[in-house]
Amino acid sequence: MNFADYMIPDAGSMPRMEIHYRESPSPHSIGGFKGMGESGAVNPPAAIANAVTDALKPFGIKVNHTPIQPGWIVDAVTAAQV
């Protein structure tokens, strides 16, 4: 079995979905807001750092900072090969 055996999903093959909203305002803030917009700013850099660490695992390199610059990757791989 390979990727050619799988159909690419399209709008016609998706199951019917219903969206239900459930509100639970925070009693601790004016307006009832809870962490608006935080997930979009906090999670991606950590996910990218983990992906780069996974890619560099053969070299024994761990990424524990962001932003990750291309030059840093080149220097780290070069140092690991010495």
Image: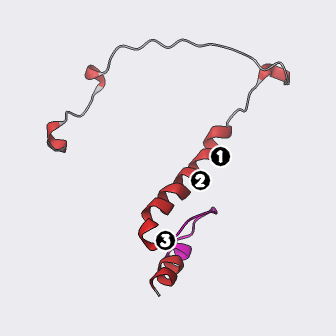
The verdict on residue 30 being magenta is no
Q: Residue furthest bottom?
A: 82
Element on which disc 2 rests: helix
Q: Earlier in the sequence, mark 3 or mark 2?
A: 2
On residue 60, the disc is 3
Q: Earlier in the sequence, mark 3 or mark 1?
A: 1
Task: Identify residue for label 2.
Answer: 45
Amino acid type of the residue that numbered disc 2 sits on in the rendered structure: Pro
Q: Position of residue 35 (x, y in %)?
A: 73, 32
Mark 3 vs mark 1, foreground winner is: 3
Residue 57 as seen in the image, left or right of residue 25: left
Separation of marks 3 and 2 at Cα, in angstroms = 20 Å
Answer above or below: position of 43 versus 80: above
On residue 24, the disc is none
Marks 3 and 2 in Cβ contact (< 8 Å): no
Amino acid type of the residue that numbered disc 3 sits on in the rendered structure: Gly
> For the point 62% across and 13% down, which residue is it?
22
Element on which disc 3 rests: loop
> For the point 19% across and 36% down, which residue is it?
6
Q: Main secondary structure of the magenta part?
A: loop
Marks 2 and 1 in Cβ contact (< 8 Å): yes
**Location of residue 20 by image quarter:** top right
Residue 7 as seen in the image, left or right of residue 25: left
Element on which disc 1 rests: helix
